[in-house]
Image (spheres, rainbow, N blue to C red):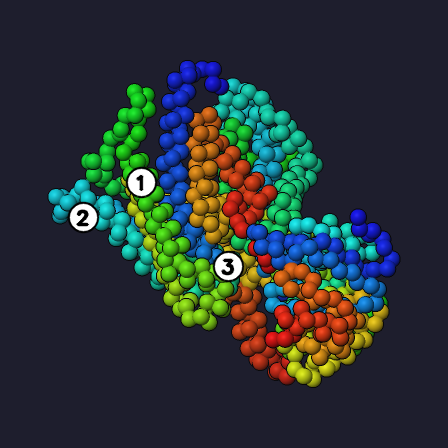
Amino acid sequence: MINPFTHKYMNGREALGFAILAAIIFVLFPLVLEPFRLNLFGKYLTYAFVAVGLVLCWGVGGILSLGQGVFFGLGGYCMAMFLKLEASSPENTAIQSTPGIPDFMDWNQLTALPWWWEPFNSFAFTIFAVVAVPVVFAFVIGVAMFRRRVGGVYFAIITQAIAAILTILIIGQQGFTGGVNGITDLRTLHGWDIRTDEAKTTLYFVNGVLLFAVLFAAQFVRKSKLGRLLIAMRDQEDRVRFSGYDVANFKIFVFCLGAAFAAIGGAMFTLQVGFMSPSFVGIVPSIEMVIFAAVGGRLSILGAVYGTLLVNWAKTTFSESFPELWLLGLGALFIAVVMAFPNGLAGVWAEQVAPRLRKLWPGNAAAPENTPAE
Amino acid sequence: MFSDYSMSELTAIFAMQGFAGLILFSVFVLMALGLAIIFGQMGVINMAHGEFMILGAYVTYLLSNFFEAYLPALFSIYFFIAMALAFVVSGALGMFVEWAMIRHLYKRPLDTLLATWGLSLILQQVYRSVFGAREVGVTIPDWMIGSLPLTDMIEIPINGIFVMVLAVGISVAVYVMMYRSRWGQQVRAINNNRVMADAVGINTAWTDRMTFAIGCGVAGVAGSAFTMIGSTGPTAGQLYIVDTFLVVVFGGAGSLLGTIASAFSISQAQSILEFFLSGSMAKVLTLLTVVGILMLRPQGLFAMKLRK
Amino acid sequence: MLDYNNPNFVLMVEGLTVSFDGFKAVNDLSFYVEPNECRVIIGPNGAGKTTVLDLICGRTKATAGAVAFKGHDLLKMREDQIVHAGVGRKFQTPSVYEDLSVFANLELSYPKGHGVFGALFFRRDQAVRERIEEIAEMIFLKDHLAQKAAFLSHGQKQWLEIGMLLIQDPELLMLDEPVAGMSVAERKKTAELLNRIIADRSVIVIEHDMGFVEDIATRVTVLHQGKVLSEGSMDRVQNDPKVIEVYLGH
C-alpha cells in the first residue's frame, strides 16, 4: 500500500536513475571517448535540453510545440553574437573595408554595427539575453495563443509556421545575421580559445552540469502540484478551469520554461560547436527534437536524455556509413514510436526490462510493483 | 516608391503582379483542397501531404517520358491522362496509409502529425532513390507554351491560365463532392458525430478511408498541375506544407469557401509585396500577418459559432 | 437595472440570452435563487438547461442579459474568477483527472496555491491532508485515496467530482444530472450525500429523475425552448397544465 500523504520530490528509484545518468555523463563518456567524440556527445547533450523541455510541455502538459528550434536558435544566436564580436576586434579584421565589425556584415556592405548588436559586447548582457530573449518571445506567443485558447494541432501548426518565418528572416537578412551560413568562425571567450581540445572538454563538463541543473528543475516542476496540474489540464482542461485555475497562465509558464531550457542548450551548442546557423532553427530540426523526447519516452525526464543520445548517435553512425538509409530509418522511427512504443524507451524499460531485472534479484522477487498514481 | 513609375507602367505592374498572384492563388487552392478535405473534414493532420503532391508530379513526369518515347502522336493530350493517373496513384497510396497507420490514430491528432512526418521522410528518401536528388521537369505540350498578349504591356502565360482553369475545375468538383453528394453528406455526418453516424448505418471506417484517399488523390492532381509551371524534386513537398496548413487554418477548418478566400488573400498579399520587397521579406511579412490574425481570430476567417 | 447587491438573493439571472448562429438556445431567461435554496431545473431535452449552467459559470459567453452573484457581475468574469467568487460546477459526464490518484484529484481542487508560483511551491501540510480526508469520508472514498481515478466506478467518479467541488466550499453549487448512470444503491447514497451538502449553501440541480427531484427540491423551474415555462413548488409545477402538456404528460 502506498502512502498517499508522503510527498517527495524524488524517490529512491528516481535518485538512482539520476546517479546512473550522472555516472554515464561525467565518468563513462570522458573515460572512453576521445576528445573529438566527447565533443560530439556534448553537442548531442545540448539537444537534450530541448527534449527535457518538450517532456514538460508536450508529454506532461499536452502542448506540442513544433517550434522549439526557434528558442534553441535564439539562445545560440545570442551567444554567437557575443563570440563573433570578440572575434571581430579591429586587429583581427584589419583587412576589411570596415574593420571591427563581423566579416559577413563587411561582405554585405554594412559600414557600422547595427544598434541591436551593441549590447552583445557585454558578456553579462549576453548571459541575460540567452535566456531572456527566447523566454520573452515564448511569453508573447504563449499569451497570444493560450489566452485565446488556441491549443492542440493549431498550436503545433502555428509554432511550426513561426519556425519557418524565423528561418526565412535569418536567411534573408544576411547582412545582420550571417544568412544561410549563420555566424561562424567563433574563436575565443574572454580571450580563452574555445577551439582547443582542453577547452572543449571543459565546456563538455560545464554543459553536463547545466544539463543536470535543468534536469533537477524539471524534476521539481514535475513533482510539484504544478506538475500534477499540467497532467490534469492535458486530460480535463475544463475541470481544471472550474477548479479555479487560470489555465492559460500555467501553459504560458511551462512553454516559457521549455523555451528557457532550449535556449540554454542553444548557447552551449554555440560554445561547443563554434557556430550557429539557421539550420538549427527551422521546421526540420524542431520536429526532430520532438522525436528525441518521443524516443526517450514523452513522460520521462531522464528518458529524454537517453532518447536524444540514442537518436543522434544513430544518426551520426548511419549517415557516416549509409546516408541514404538514415532518412528511411528516421521516418520509420517516427512511425514506430507513435504506433508501437508511445511511451518510448522509458516505457519499454518500465514494462519489459525492469520487471525481469527484479525477478533476477532474489531478495526483491516478492516486492510488488509500486507504481504510484500521481 | 511609386514616383519612379508612370501611371500606365504602374497599372501594368499591378496587373502583372495581380496575375502572378492569381497563379499563386491557383497553386495554393490546389494544394489546400486536398488538405481541406483531410484536415477540415476528418481533423487529421497529414504532414506528408506535400509528398502526395510530389507523387502526382512524378507520375506526370514518368508519363511525359513514356508518351514522348512510345506515343508521340498523343503527346499533346498526355497531360490529362497523367492527371487522372496521378489521382489514382496518390489516392491508392492514401488508402493504404489510412489502413496501415491513420485509422489507429484518430483519437491522437498530435501523434498523427508525428507519424505522418515520419511517412514524409520515408517518401522523400524513396523519391530520391528512385528519381535521383536532382529536380526533374516535364516536357510541356506545344499548345501550352507561350503567352496571350492582353495589351502591349501585359502578357499572360498560357500554362498559368491552364493552372487557373484547373484550380477552378477541381474546386467545383470538390464542392459538389462534399456538399452535393451522398458521400459528402456522410463525411460531414461523421465529422459531426461519429458514434451516431455509425449507429445510423454509415460505414464510418470505409468512409474515412475513402475521404483520406480522395484528399490524397486531389493532392496528386495538384502535384501533376505543378509540373506545368515548375520542376519537381524529392524535397519540394516539404516547402509547401507550412503554406498549405496556414491557408487551411486561416480560412477556418471545415469551410471550403474559407479555404479559397484565404488562399486568395494570402497569395495576393504575397505577390504584391514581392514587387516592393525582396521575395523572402514578402513571405515573412505575409506569414507574420497570417499568424498575427490567427492569434486574434483562432477559428479562422470563416467559422460557425457552435453550441458546446 | 439589476441591483447586484440585493441581499435577498444569492443568484439573480435576468434577461439571459444566448444565440448560436441565430438559434436562441436560451431566450430572455430570468430566475432568482435565494440563500440555502435548492433549485431544480427540469425540462425536455434541448430546453437549454445545461446551457444555462454554462452561461452562469462562464463556459459560454452570453449574448444579452445579466447574471449577478453576491455583488459580482458573472458575465464579465473568467471561469476561474467565477470559481473564486464561490460558484462550483459539476458536469454532466463525470470529469475527474483519470491519470491522477483520488488524493491528487482532491488536492488539486483544494482552494490554495492557484497561481503559477503558488502551485509550484505548494506544500502538502497537515491542514490540507485533514481536509482531504474529511471530504473523502463524506464522499465514501476514504479507502480509495491512493487509487487512480481511472479505476473508480462510474458512480464513484460522480462522487469524486462532487467532492472536488465540496473541498472548495462554494456558496453556490451547480450540479448537472448528479445521479445519471448510477445504480439504485448508488443513487440512494448520492441522495443522502446531496441532502447533507445542500444544507448550508444554495444549489442548482439539473435532473430528470422525478423521485429524486421531489426529494431535494425547494423550488422547481421548468425550462422549455430556452424560456421559463413554469416555476414554483414541485406540487404547483406538477399540476401546471402547460408543464403537463410539454413534459410530464408524455
Q: Is mark 3 on a helix, strand or loop?
A: helix
Identity of the residue drawn at 49% across and 24% down: A108
Q: Chain letter of disc 3?
A: B
Left or right: B35 with respect to A292? left
Q: Mark 3 against mark 2, which lies toward the viewer?
A: 3
Q: Chain letter of disc 1?
A: B
Q: Is mark 2 on a helix, strand or loop?
A: helix
Q: Determine if residue A54 is in view.
A: no
What is the number of the mark on residue B66?
A: 2
> Can you give x and y, in whole percent of width and height, for residue B252 in the image?
50, 48
Q: What element carries label 1?
A: helix
Read off the residue under disc 3: B109
Identity of the residue drawn at 47% across and 33% down: B269
Q: In which quarter of the image is residue B231?
A: top left
Pick the front one: B46 or A180: B46
> Can you give x and y, in whole percent of width and height, for residue C185 in the image?
69, 84
Mark 3 to mark 2 CA distance (whole Å): 40 Å
Identity of the residue drawn at 37% across and 40% down: B26
Read off the residue under disc 1: B165
Callouts 3 and 1 on one subunit: yes
Q: In which quarter of the image is residue C36?
A: bottom right
Label 2: how many residues lie within 10 Å, few (<14), some (14-19) or many (20+)? some
Q: In which quarter of the image is residue A122?
A: top right
Under mark 3, the amino acid is: Pro
User: Is C68 situated above or below C211?
Assistant: above
Identity of the residue drawn at 53% across and 38% down: B288
Left or right: C130 with respect to C98? right
Sequence order check, earlier mark of 1 and 2:
2
Under mark 1, the amino acid is: Val
Sequence order check, earlier mark of 3 and 1:
3
